[in-house]
Image (cartoon, rainbow, N blue to C red):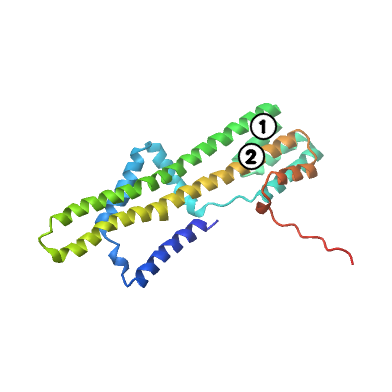
C-alpha cells in the first residue's frame, strides 16, 4: 500500500485547521450543514449527469484503490519474467503451462497459457495490446469522473454563495445579522474550492497515475513474455527490460569497491 493520498489529504486538512486556529477561529465556523450539503450533493449529482451510471459505479469501485492501491515494483516483474525465461530455456515453452497455474496475475497467466498453446507471436502481441488498452481505458474512466467533480465543485460553491446572498439581501433591515449571514454565504464557495483541490482532483490524479503505472507494468510483461516465446537469452532479456524502466524506479545496485 502506498499512503501518498492519505498523507497528502490529511496534511492539507491539517494545514487548514492550523490556519483557522492561528486566525483565532474555530473549525465549526466552516462546518455548516447547508452549504456542505449543496456543494457535495450537487457536485456528485452533476458529475453523474455528465456521464453514465456505469461510469459512476466504476468510479465508486475504484475509489478504495486511490487510497490503498499498491504501486507496482518493476524489478519484481523483471525478476519474475527472467525466471520464466530460464525455465523455458531449460524445459521448453510447454513448461510455462505449469507456471501459468501458479501465477496470480490474470494478465501474465493468460499470456503464458497462450504461449504454451502455441499462439503465434504477432497474434499474441495484438491480443495483449488489446487487453492493455481495454484495461487502461477502464481505469481512465474512474480517474476522469473524479477530475470532472473537481471541475464542477468550485462553480457549485459559487452557486451556493449566490443563493445565500439573496437571503442576506432579505435581511438588510437588520444590520446586526448581516455579518454572520455574509460569512456563512461564502462558506459554500470555500467548500467548493476545498472539495475540488483537497479531494476530487487529487483522487482523480492518483487514479490516473496508478493507471499509468499499471499500463507500464503490463507493457513490461508483454515485451518480456514475447521475448521468452522468441527464445531470448535470460540475462540479455533482463538487461533489455531494465532499460525500459526509469532508473529511479529500480533498486540501486551496490558499487563494487576498487581493489587497493
Distance from Cα at disc 2 to Cα at disc 1: 16 Å
Q: Which mark is residue 234?
A: none
Q: List x then y, in percent, for residue 161.
A: 25, 53
**Can I make out residue 158 in this image?**
yes
- Which quadrant of the figure contains the N terminus? bottom right
Q: What residue sits right under mark 1 in the picture?
A: 114
Please name whichever residue, 46 or 187, is drawn nearer the observer in this view of the structure.
187
Dividing the picture into quadrants, the one containing residue 13 is bottom left
Indicate left or right for 44 with 168 as reference: right
Dividing the picture into quadrants, the one containing residue 227 is top right
Q: List x then y, in percent, for residue 103.
A: 65, 44
Above or below — where is 39 with respect to 236? below
Above or below — where is 250 with respect to 97? below
Few, some or many residues within 10 Å of mark 1 (<14, 14–19, 20+): some
- Which quadrant of the figure contains the C terminus? bottom right
Residue at figure coordinates x 54%, y 38% from the top left: 135
Please name whichever residue, 254 or 106, is drawn nearer the observer in this view of the structure.
254
Q: List x then y, in percent, for residue 168.
A: 17, 57
Residue at figure coordinates x 66%, y 41% from the top left: 220
Q: What residue sits right under mark 2 in the picture?
A: 219
Residue at figure coordinates x 68%, y 27% from the top left: 122
Q: List x then y, in percent, for residue 214.
A: 58, 44
- Helix, strand, or loop for circle 2? helix
Please name whichever residue, 135 or 213, is drawn nearer the observer in this view of the structure.
213
Few, some or many residues within 10 Å of mark 2 (<14, 14–19, 20+): some
Amino acid at each position: 500500500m502506498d499512503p501518498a493520498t492519505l498523507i497528502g489529504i490529511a496534511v492539507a486538512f491539517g494545514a487548514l485547521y492550523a490556519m483557522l486556529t492561528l486566525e483565532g477561529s474555530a473549525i465549526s465556523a466552516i462546518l455548516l450543514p447547508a452549504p456542505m450539503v449543496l456543494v457535495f450533493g450537487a457536485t456528485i449529482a452533476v458529475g453523474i449527469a455528465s456521464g453514465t451510471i456505469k461510469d459512476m459505479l466504476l468510479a465508486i469501485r475504484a475509489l478504495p484503490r486511490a487510497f490503498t492501491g499498491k504501486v507496482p515494483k518493476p524489478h519484481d516483474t523483471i525478476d519474475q519474467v527472467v525466471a520464466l525465461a530460464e525455465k523455458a530455456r531449460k524445459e521448453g515453452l510447454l513448461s510455462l503451462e505449469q507456471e501459468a497455474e501458479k501465477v496470480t496475475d490474470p494478465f501474465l497467466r493468460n499470456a503464458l497459457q497462450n504461449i504454451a498453446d502455441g499462439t503465434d507471436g504477432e497474434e499474441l502481441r495484438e491480443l495483449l495490446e488489446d487487453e492493455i488498452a481495454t484495461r487502461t481505458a477502464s481505469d481512465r474512466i474512474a480517474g476522469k469522473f473524479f477530475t470532472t467533480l473537481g471541475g464542477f465543485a468550485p462553480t457549485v460553491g459559487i452557486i451556493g454563495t449566490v443563493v445565500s446572498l439573496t437571503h442576506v439581501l432579505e435581511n438588510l433591515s437588520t444590520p446586526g445579522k448581516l455579518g454572520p449571514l455574509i460569512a456563512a454565504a461564502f462558506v459554500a464557495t470555500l467548500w467548493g474550492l476545498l472539495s475540488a483541490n483537497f479531494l476530487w482532483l487529487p483522487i482523480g490524479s492518483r487514479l490516473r497515475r496508478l493507471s499509468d503505472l499499471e499500463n507500464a507494468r503490463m507493457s513490461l510483461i508483454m515485451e518480456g513474455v514475447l521475448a521468452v516465446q522468441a527464445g531470448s537469452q535470460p540475462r540479455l532479456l533482463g538487461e533489455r527490460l531494465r532499460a525500459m524502466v526509469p532508473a529511479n524506479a529500480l533498486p540501486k545496485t551496490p558499487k563494487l569497491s576498487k581493489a587497493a
